[in-house]
Image: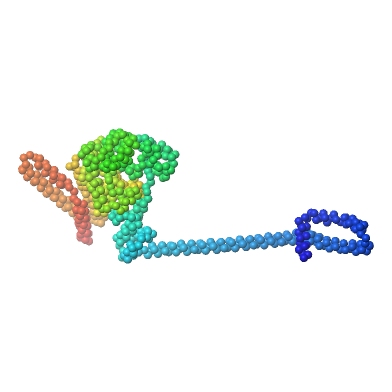
Amino acid sequence: MAGPKLGKKSGSKLGKLPAKKKQKKEPLPAKPLEKEELFSDSEGTDGDFQEDDEQEINSDSEMSSDIDDPFAADILGSGDADDGSDVNSDSNADSDSDADDNDLVRKSKAIDDERKREEEDNDLELQLNIKEEADDFRLPTTEELEEETQRPPDLSNLQRRIKEIVRVLSNLKSLRQEGVTRKDYVDQLKSDLGSYYGYNDFLIESLVELFPPVELIELIEAFEKPRPISLRTNTLKSRRRDLAGVLLNRGVNLDPLSKWSKVGLVVYDSQVPVGATPEYMAGHYMLQSASSFLPVMALAPQENERVVDMAAAPGGKTTYVAALMKNSGIIYANEMKESRLKSLTANLHRMGVTNTIVCNYDGRELPKVLGQNTADRILLDAPCSGTGVISKDESVKTSKTAPDIQNCSQLQKELILAAIDMVDANSKSGGYIVYSTCSIMVEENEAVIDYALKKRDVKLVPCGLDFGRPGFIRFRQHRFHTSLDKTRRFYPHVHNMDGFFVAKLKKMSNSKSAAKSSVQSEEVEGAESIENSDQQDSEEDDDKHSDKKGIANENRKLREEVAGDKKRKRDVQTHSVKKGAGQNSGATKNGKAENQVVATKKREKKKPLPREEIAKAREEKRNALREATRKATMKNK
């Protein structure tokens, strides 16, 4: 019980340390006074008083020992004790905190190591799985394909299989499965692409024929994304810089379209409808795809010319032509569908075009209406299948078939002949026809131009466009005119614009009878150049493989014999022509028949040999030269 009491007293004394010291010094002189009071008031004896004094002294000593010792301990010794305890506690706390920190660091490090180990294991397992899938890729069997048809399509599986097939086709020699041909991979790729992207069999097959597998996937993926919104500045009312500043202030985020266009702008996003701004209503710009700029740029109309736009609606190209002509000259804007005349007329009025006459005729009948050989330039943006603008119209994926393509091709051939007939070959500044389509099919592009080259006296000229891929000269079994590399093809995955085709023709003469002369002469020259090059190649081969003069002499003799045979054939043909001419002259009264027969024979004579016969004759020559060289070498040995 004394312990707690002392603790309380010591605690109270520690709380009032300065006051306790004063109490300890001050009561000493006051004790005698208290004794005197006791003596005066008490009635006891001296012994009693002595005993009382002794008891008081003893009690005081006991009190002092009870009070002062703990207090002194608190003042003197407790500080050391407290310091020691504080130091010990601090050291213990520090050691505990260090230990705790070490434990936390150790645990966190263990957790990090374990997590890192798990990630490495997962990555390794993933790589092994990918490698196993890549190395062990096999085409699905017939039973597996039947099971797939009975359940909903697994798009992730289709996508993975498409990627694997494309990877195998890119390196077929080393990655091909045993017993599987390229045709098997291609057939499966067609089926998977049709199922995954929603194309019909005809269109997928056509695209597979046009592009290699890797580029085919890029094209199809590009068709799934919309093309950037572009607009064309109407230079009749505004300038591109001024228009861009106004639209930027309205919250339209835009940039110049590209280096090849001085009037185009590309819109990334807008806080206002781009097709409903005051500037749009006032005709300061036209919403127009970037690919639609190209035919007008290729046409390059000049001021005061007579231009015909054979398929004008909705008026984007027509208004561009009018802006380049600065509202001078005459533009005939023809549209066959009457329902589209309203949009055409509205755009012409809105854009401030005043030199255009709108008409509603079938384009094939325009030469009868406007007259033949009357226009300086013709723009024919022909109706087509729309296979280049699938991103705008996804119905093309399933709606187009082979008969549709053939019908479009036939219509385009008739339209381009009508366009050529309307152009004046003697025009001082013109005589050009620009043909364009929003299709990527060969039947609607190169085949149509090749048909026009054979039917009319025209030739291809450069389009004036610095970009774009050249057209096909050969495509599968087709062989087109060599000048078709001057045409231009545009693709969404390459040029970030709609699929497009542009060709520019120059009319050489207004006479239809001489339509084949230029083409045939070019073909003859091409055949002769092929023969000459083959002859030069054979001579180089002879010089390389035979260093002796005897071999060269025999080869020369052989070539002379071949040339002699050709000369004899020509003499026979000339003799037959003269003989026929003599007979006809005796039978007729005037010399017109003779001239006609001679002219007919000359035209027949100019007719070139088919390419197959030329190739066959060339191969026979080479074989003959090789055989002669071999015999001469054996003879010399």
Image quarter in which the C terminus is found: bottom left
Q: Quadrant of residue 75?
A: bottom right
Q: Quadrant of the N terminus?
A: bottom right
The front one of 238 and 393 is 393
Residue at the image point whose x is 9% and y is 40% from the top: 591
Q: Position of residue 205 (x, y in %)?
A: 29, 55
Q: Residue at x 17, y 47 (%)?
A: 607
Q: Is residue 7 above or below residue 599?
A: below
Evaluate whether residue 429 shows in this view. Answer: no
Q: Is residue 387 visible?
A: yes
Frontmost residue, 72 versus 516: 72
Where residue 561 sits: x, y (%)? 16, 53
The structure residue drawn at horizontal position 42% and vertical position 45%, both measured from the top left corner, is 269
Which image quarter: residue 166?
Answer: bottom left
Q: Is residue 576 left or right of residue 363?
A: left
Placement of 635 over or under 560, stated as above or below: below
Side of 331 relative to 556 (left or right): right
Query: Picture coordinates of residue 176 (x, y %)?
Result: 33, 62
